[in-house]
Amino acid sequence: MILDGQDDLTRDVLAVMQATPDPRLREIMVALSKHLHAFVREVRLTEDEFREATAILNEIGSLASDTHNEFVLMAGSLGVSSLVCLLNNGDNGATETSQNLLGPFWRLHSPRTENGGSILRSPTAGPAMFTRLRFVDQAKKPVAGVDVDIWHTSPNGLYENQDEAQADFNMRGTLTTDANGEIWFRSVKPAGYPIPTNGVVGRLLAAQQRHPYRPAHIHALAFKQGYKTLISQIYADDDPRVHTDAQFGVTRALLGTFEMHDAPHPTARDVTAPWYSLDHTLILEAGAAKLPKPPIK
């Protein structure tokens, strides 16, 4: 492979990639090489920019820890995470889907919680919220026996692993759907929050004059054999940044009505107004049930 010029380079690289034995790897590597070379040509990438780009990739890798995943943040900030999700769900992008981003804060082994119970593990100031989630199949029939992991931020915008004042697994719990395909629990209303900005992603957002905030949301991960594991988020319709999510995650199917109530709660006497309720339906698709690798330990 003695090159006479840049066109020879791309031709030779593609020829090598075409010789990859595995068909799927071959398809990916051919397309990756083709588009990478086209990108470099389109923007006429300079040598200094190339060296800076490789240094940035090295920096992103060095920022990984048990509590932080910079690559996940970057993929979300570029819209890649949402694109992969939407392409692979809802009949391969043809219809709406309840699937959404996993995010960087899911943990294994959340405490088992009975329906109607609280997922608060330590005193947490903020308006009470009562949530009911309904899980149905693609024919809109309820699915019983689904194990559902729930997690969300405190009203101060922090997950418990970010906040020493919160007990371990605060605002996290695993519940199981009843015969009606429902789980219900008590917590406090989550707040929107800024993604970490002390790394590469933060510098990118600043350079683009973008804010780093995600709108308030509740995470749900639903697992049952016979169904594709559902990874979802329900977004608060009253959040002022619901149209400008820094991670491009909000879809119309997952816009939840966080309804405020000024009257006393009908059964919880310790709840003062205002309090909130959320009632939302999520759709499970047929497929293989498998858990993702937790982004943090």
Image (cartoon, grey):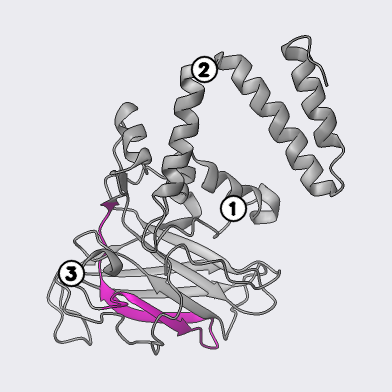
Residue 47 tag number:
2
Disc number lying in front (2 or 1): 2
- Indicate whether 124 appears above or below 31: below
Q: Secondary structure at mark 1?
A: loop
What whole-number distance in Å separates the C-alpha atoms at marks 2 and 1? 43 Å
The residue carrying mark 1 is: 96
Which one is earlier in the sequence, the residue at label 2 or at label 1? 2
Q: Residue at x 38, y 85 (%)?
A: 111
- How far apart are the two marked residues, 3 and 1, measured between alpha carbons? 31 Å
Span highlighted in magenta in the image: 168-193
Circle 3 is placed at which residue position? 127
Identify the residue shown where x is 70% and y is 54%: 91
Q: Residue type at mark 3?
A: Pro
Pick the quarter of the image with the N terminus: top right
Check disc 1 and give the amino acid type.
Glu
Left/right placement of residue 96 relative to residue 253 reads right
